[in-house]
Amino acid sequence: LLGGGISTRLLQRGYGVNAVRKGIMLCAALLVLPVPVALTAHSYPLAIAIIALTLAAHQAFSTNLFALIADVVPQEKVGRVTAFGAFSGNIGGLVIAKVAGLVLSAGLGYLPLFGFAAISYLLAIGWIQLLVPVIRTVDGPPGAREIVPAH
């Protein structure tokens, strides 16, 4: 709830969509980094707190990622782009499930999986920055959006 609420308030206060979306996604990505520490936590409450923080950060990231689609895609195509993203995410989930099974069957434990989870959000925000260097909402008819390439 915080990821969506904070972004809404910042946008209402006049902050740019580029800084708000990417800033919140970067903060969420940084909050996921400690997830491997849950494996070495000496108490269940600490392990649960670390995993809960990770799950909350995931939701903040996801909320702003879905909002980013609405920011950069014409209104009439938001559904298609969101559906394609969800489909791609589900295919990725299938691959990760298979990889997780192979990693665990090989006796490697959860550390490689938690390590990948820790960095995956930073990799995602890196790809977003590479593909959409500047997000800017332009004035115009409803649904009119523009992505401005980096120079």
Image (cartoon, rainbow, N blue to C red):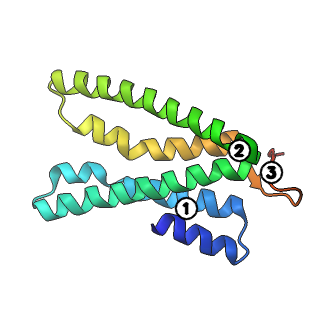
Residue ID at (83%, 51%): 144
Q: Amino acid at mark 1?
A: Ile
Report, in whole angstroms, how far the alpha carbon at label 2 lies from the one at label 1.
16 Å
Location of the N terminus by quadrant is bottom left
Relative depth, front residue between 10 and 69: 69
Q: Amino acid at mark 2?
A: Val
- Position of residue 111 in the picture relative to residue 145 (left or right): left
Where in the figure is residue 50, as x and y percent of width and height?
26, 59
Mark before the other along the chain sequence, 1 or 3: 1
Label 3 element class: loop
Mark before the other along the chain sequence, 2 or 1: 1
- Position of residue 8 in the picture relative to residue 53 (left or right): right
- Position of residue 63 in the picture relative to residue 108 (left or right): right
The residue singled out by tag 2 in the image is 132
Residue ID at (28%, 59%): 52
The label number, if any, that marks residue 24 in the structure image: 1
Report, in whole angstroms, how far the alpha carbon at label 1 lies from the one at label 3.
20 Å
Mark 2 near mark 1, Cβ–Cβ under 8 Å? no
The residue singled out by tag 3 in the image is 145
Other residues around mark 1 within 10 Å, as few (<14) / some (14–19) / many (≥20) = many
